[in-house]
Amino acid sequence: MLQTALRLLHAHHTHDLNVRGAYLHIMGDVLGSAAAIVAALVIQFTGWLPIDPLISAFISLLILASAWRLIRESATILLDKVPPHLEVPEVEGRLLAVAGVERVHDVHVWTVTSGLVAMSAHAVVPELSDHPATLRRLGDEMLALGIGHVTIQLETGGPCGGEDCGDEALVDEGRAAAHDRMRVVALTVIAGTMGPQTATLTLDIEGKQQTVQSAGNGPVDATFNAIRQIIPHQAKLLLYQVHAVTEGTDAQAEVSVRLDEDGRTVTGRGADTDTLVASARAYVSALNKLTVKRQKTAAAKEAL
């Protein structure tokens, strides 16, 4: 019966995790039975008793190694991780290589189930008439990578407001990081139910430190007011979002802040175990990127 089950499952065990789990279970039974027979014969004819635990340990190691691979692949699916044979930059590169695609952003790749990889992305294709043909070519490129379920939203352009807007946004982020004219040095916030919330903030601006104290309708508002007091600007706050990137009471918080100034949209990010410090870093990061965009706009106007 075990031999029949093994023959039935063998052809499919490499393509389906459920079948592989059943296959490994039956294989474990077969190996256990075979090991018991071998150990019994050795003991019967030689009297060497250690053979029994040695064979048992060997079979256990084989089963453990196979089970670990099964668990690892299951975790990849359950956690929506990128498949091990793919990398997001590779997928982005194949998308950008398609004629008519100006940039891509918000690219996500994950495993749905055994043998089925899915992806979603936004692609900017300025020419509306090219969308049908471009979409087909993008699907073909993803199929060549082994991605069977493809969801791509085509856009004609406009301000870049997503989490990641391709090469152009990466260049701006690199310039902002290199420029880094503003940096959070220290932050102390007084908050609670008894009295106004105040923030004392120290920023380093091109090597010179400035410290101010500001109040607000909450600790985050007080922190942002302090930043505005040191760095006056007209940018509007479009998004403030907090993510816990680790677990526990000492979780590392990641904060996203999106600002818009005259159609220039930037997203800054900051991380720290203190959410308010992460918030201040994210806001300052966005202002650094906004400075880069201002410089690009000024340079373009001068070129004209």
Image (cartoon, rainbow, N blue to C red):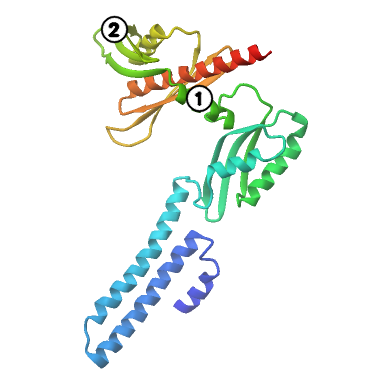
x and y, in percent, of residue 120 in the image: 58, 39
Residue 151: image quadrant is top right
- Disc 1 crowd rating (10 Å Cα; few below 14, some 14-19, many 20+) is some
Q: Left or right: where does residue 190 sit relative to residue 269?
A: left
Between the C-alphas of marks 2 and 1, the distance is 38 Å
The residue sitting at the bottom extreme is 45
Residue 280 in view in this figure: yes
Amino acid at circle 1:
Arg
Look at 38% across and 19% down and name the residue there: 183
Between 105 and 177, the residue placed more toward the observer is 177
Q: How many marks?
A: 2
Counting residues from the start of the chain, the first of labels 2 and 1 encountered is 1
> Residue 201's spot in the image, x, y percent?
32, 13
Query: What amino acid is labelled 2 in the image?
Result: Pro
Whether 295 is drawn above or below 83: the answer is above
Q: Is residue 69 above or below residue 178?
A: below
Q: Quadrant of residue 92?
A: top right
Q: Which residue is mark 2?
A: 196
Q: Nearer the viewer, mark 2 or mark 1?
A: 1
Secondary structure category for the residue under label 1: helix
In the rendered image, residue 141, in percent from the top left (x then y), is placed at: 66, 46
Determine which residue is flagged by label 1: 175
Q: Look at the numbered disc 2 and give the secondary structure of its residue.
A: loop
Q: Residue at x 36, y 69 (%)?
A: 62
Q: Position of residue 167 (x, y in %)?
A: 58, 32
Left or right of 40: which side holds 108?
right
Q: Residue at x 29, y 17 (%)?
A: 186
Closer to us: 163 or 185: 185
